[in-house]
Amino acid sequence: MLTIHTLLYGDKYNFDDVNRIAAATDMQYRYVCHTDQGERLRDEGLYPEIILRWADSELGTFEKVNILGQDWGQSLYLDLDIVIQKPEKVWELFTEGMKICKTHWKPDGFEAEHGGGDFNSSVMAWKGFQGVGIKKHFNENPYKWFKEYKGCDDKYLFHEHKDKFQTYDKGVLYSYMYGIDHETDVSPRGRKYRPDPTICLLNGQDRHNFDLRTDYYTHFSNNKVG
């Protein structure tokens, strides 16, 4: 069975954001929400079909590394700050090997010498226990990696496990604020609705004083009207 995973902790997101992923894909997959909030989400209105699994909120986004080490068959992890634009193509994101979003909107190796990298863990795929070695490596000294990579799991994955991942091709995923391809994007690169990719990442919310999802749908509507 194909399984879609999400992660919810703290108060940044709520049950609506988890439900949105399931609704956008017409409930065609198995859904697992990894969370520190348990049955409270169910009481608030989480779809009963969504499986709840405990997550360690102290690890923040590094809990994704633990999710990678779990066997749910063919799995796809999706951050809650994404928009599924082509639900009929989501099945193509599942892979036989491990795959992760590459930040094609930045030059290769951008700021890698300062701890940056080319991975964005908003979208990841794996099969079975393919990620168990990564999970084991991380949990041997989790707070070392948390400190070294300043709480950024995708930087850890890039610098410590780059050779284990394939990346999604250009044009499959894009960043609403930062573009789709740094080689071909024209200014302004951000705040653009691009209709062809399967998924739009709304990454970078903490750097902006307006709501990215609302802004996205404004440009989406303008594009449709135009």
Image (cartoon, rainbow, N blue to C red):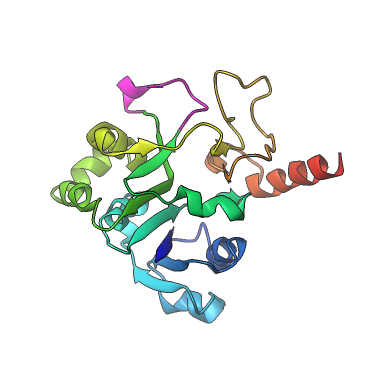
180 sits to left or right of 141: right
Whether residue 53 is in magenta: the answer is no
Q: Quarter holding the N terminus?
A: bottom left
134 sits to left or right of 100: left
Please indicate, yes or no, whether residue 152 appears anywhere in the rendered image.
no
Q: Classify residue 99 by image quadrant.
A: top left
36 or 167: which is nearer to us? 167
> Which residue is at 33% across, 43% downward?
153
> Which residue is at 28% across, 38% downward?
156
> Which residue is at 31% across, 46% downward?
97
Main SS of the magenta segment? loop
Where in the figure is residue 192, as x and y percent of width and height?
Answer: 69, 34
Q: Classify residue 157 by image quadrant.
A: top left
The segment highlighted magenta reads 103-116
Q: Quarter holding the C terminus?
A: top right
| As drawn, 76 above or below 26 | above
Furthest residue in direction right, as rendered: 226
Please indicate, yes or no, whether residue 44 appears anywhere in the rendered image.
yes
Where in the figure is residue 206, as x and y percent of width and height?
Answer: 53, 41
Whether residue 109 is in magenta: the answer is yes
